Amino acid sequence: MHTTNSILKDSTYRSHLTLQSVQNRVTEEITAALTDTQPTLIEALPGSGKSRGVILAAAQTGEPITIFTVRGRKEQYEQLAGWCKDAGLVAYTLPSVYHECPTVLGDHDKNHQQEMEDLLNRGLPPARIHRERDWPCHKGDRCPFVAKLDIDPDQYDVLLGHYNHAYLHWAVEGRVPVFDEFPGDAFFTEIDSEDITAYLRQNPDLPFRNIIDLVEHRDDTDRRQAAMNRLSGLELRDESLSFGLNDEGGHVLSGLGVLTLLKSTDLGNGWEQTLLGNGQVGLFDRDSNTIYVINPPALPDNIVALDGTPTKTMWDLALGFYDQRVQSLNVQRALDDEERLQYVIDTQDLTIVQTTTDARTYSSGTYVKPQRDAALVTAIEDQHDCGVGIISSGEGLDQLPMDTDRRKTAKYGNLLGSNDLGSVNVGTILGSPHYGHQYIERWGALAGIGIESNDKKGMEKSYGKFGDQILNHMREHSVLQAVFRFARDGSETTVYVDTGALPDWIPVAAGPEDVNVFSWGDGEAEIIQAVERLGTARTREIADETSLSSRYVRGVLNKFCQRGLVSKRPAPDGRGGAQVYVDDGLSARNQFGPVDLPGPQACFSELSPNNTLHGRVPKKRSGSLNIQTANEAHHEAMRRRRRQWEHVRMETWGNQAV
């Protein structure tokens, strides 16, 4: 086992934890893992150069590798290929049938396109589909997809592809497979009811007519044993069977689905699980009547997994190690606990402001609060005098009542490996992701654990000890990934995190107690518009401009008075002690609602109105931009962060030298 303990004990090394030194450390870990004899999971925080480090490590060791990743071909693959060229390595990007095949792309008739897509959806390998039929993409020459698959892998130092390319035996044999970020459910296959029924019909010796018959009578001992005996002589992974089916459905793994139903163990929460061998696991969700088979690719003993926020158990499950017991990923951390804090505070120069303790789940439009989001974004932009980068769910971004043309945005699901926000120095994260209970239950079922929630909401939601690992992976780890999407070059960056789902170890410069976000309701918005129009008016006059009662209007105006947005003065005629309300800045305030933020800080972002053609204004020019007050506030915030860092260090390590 390789370690870096000698480096970690060097206090001089700690005190100079630069971005380059962190990237060097990560490269060293990957270099050692490439020549190891066991699978290794390397934990390296986002922005620490793990993707580029793989290329540098391959160049140093001379090991042929295949990198599997999830990002789009134009972005991630081209970047990796460029790094290979810089390192003197020969790289090749593996083709995708969905990008390279004219038949799938619809360049020929729609009938052939639909037929090929149907065969692909049945789990048939794209190469075999092309071999078995005379497709229009073969006319005149071979299909471009097939031609690009016909290579000698030994001619290339690095192969680049999607996780599903790991099923190509020649892409992993004699090479070190490298999984760049968590593959998620890439190796999950969903088998629906029609697929099971089609398999039963194609094998009439099995004593069940369809899936309903199978589910209802699988406890019949005689029928189940007869089915098991018959299955022992069948191909449970049967490509020829699925290829011959037309409109009857069917899937390559339908046989494994039948075996799952016959052998599964009830987990007590509506899910059943079956260990199918070779890392394969079958699941049955009785609520949706859906079968899942996880079918991980056959991998060599040595693989390298890279993750900025890993959950080891989920990696083991995804790669098929969990049921083998004798093999498991060996975790190596590039930075220890103390260094992770230093990496956030000093190396990446991140100022993190957490604006709420609520989870603010934004996976669907149900819990989105667009007015509140707009109020917070507006306040941040006013304070920093620049456009703000925004990360949220698709629903959160779609409902935001703001013009996003001058703002860069990203969705939670598209963050891994993305550098789109890498030059934005002020960002906000709105809400946290949650993929639903079924997501957590399915991963629990994969481990043979029946997971149920405690029926609470928000940050009090729990799925038990094991289930909370999945919850944290889905929620807290996604939020942390989002934090590191901004200004990935170590430049001074402030990120406002509007969710309580931030990992506990992350140091924050200010917390929810330092922030107040309030959004105007519909009635308050009407009153604000009336005050803006009238300037000075009595309660009745303002109410007449709205659809609201005078009593309600008076209550809202008094709240505005307490916040200093309007003031009360005697009416000009002075009769009966009448008073008027005067706009004392209400019309100049945040149109979406009042927001109190910690002290202002200088912003030099590509979204800043003071930016140069090449990006940020150099920090040394801050004096000429007349932002001395902002700089002073920023330095005070930095001192506050340093005090927090010292407090955390003393609590954790006492008087031990850093």
Image (cartoon, rainbow, N blue to C red):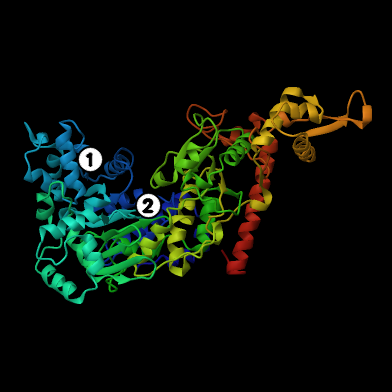
Q: Secondary structure at mark 1?
A: helix
Residue 371, horizontal then vertical, whole percent = 59, 38
Please tell me in which quadrant of the rendered image residue 546 appears.
top right
Nearer mark to the viewer, of 1 and 2:
1
Q: Residues within 10 Å of mark 2 (few under 14, many from 20)?
A: many
Q: Residues within 10 Å of mark 1 (few under 14, many from 20)?
A: few
Q: Quadrant of the N terminus?
A: bottom left
Classify residue 247 as left or right of residue 408.
left
Q: Residue at x 79, y 39 (%)?
A: 558
Please tell me in which quadrant of the rendered image residue 601 appears.
top right
Residue 62, horizontal then vertical, whole percent = 23, 54
Q: Residue at x 57, y 28 (%)?
A: 610
Residue 632, horizontal then vertical, whole percent = 69, 41
**Residue on which the image places disc 1:** 98
Q: Quick check: 530 above or below 640?
A: above
Q: Please name the amino acid that badge 1 sits on.
A: Tyr
Q: Earlier in the sequence, mark 1 or mark 2?
A: 2
**Residue on which the image places disc 2:** 50
Q: How far separated are the C-alphas under marks 1 and 2?
A: 28 Å
Q: Between 311 and 619, which is closer to the camera in this rendering?
A: 311
Instruction: Count the labels in the image.
Output: 2
Q: Please name the amino acid that badge 2 sits on.
A: Lys
Q: Quick check: 581 above or below 4?
A: above
| Residue 330 visible, this orientation | no
Q: Between 369 and 613, which is closer to the camera in this rendering?
A: 369
Residue 16, horizontal then vertical, whole percent = 51, 55
| Residue 58 visible, this orientation | yes
Q: Are marks 1 and 2 in contact (CB under 8 Å)?
A: no
What numbered label is drawn on residue 273? Answer: none
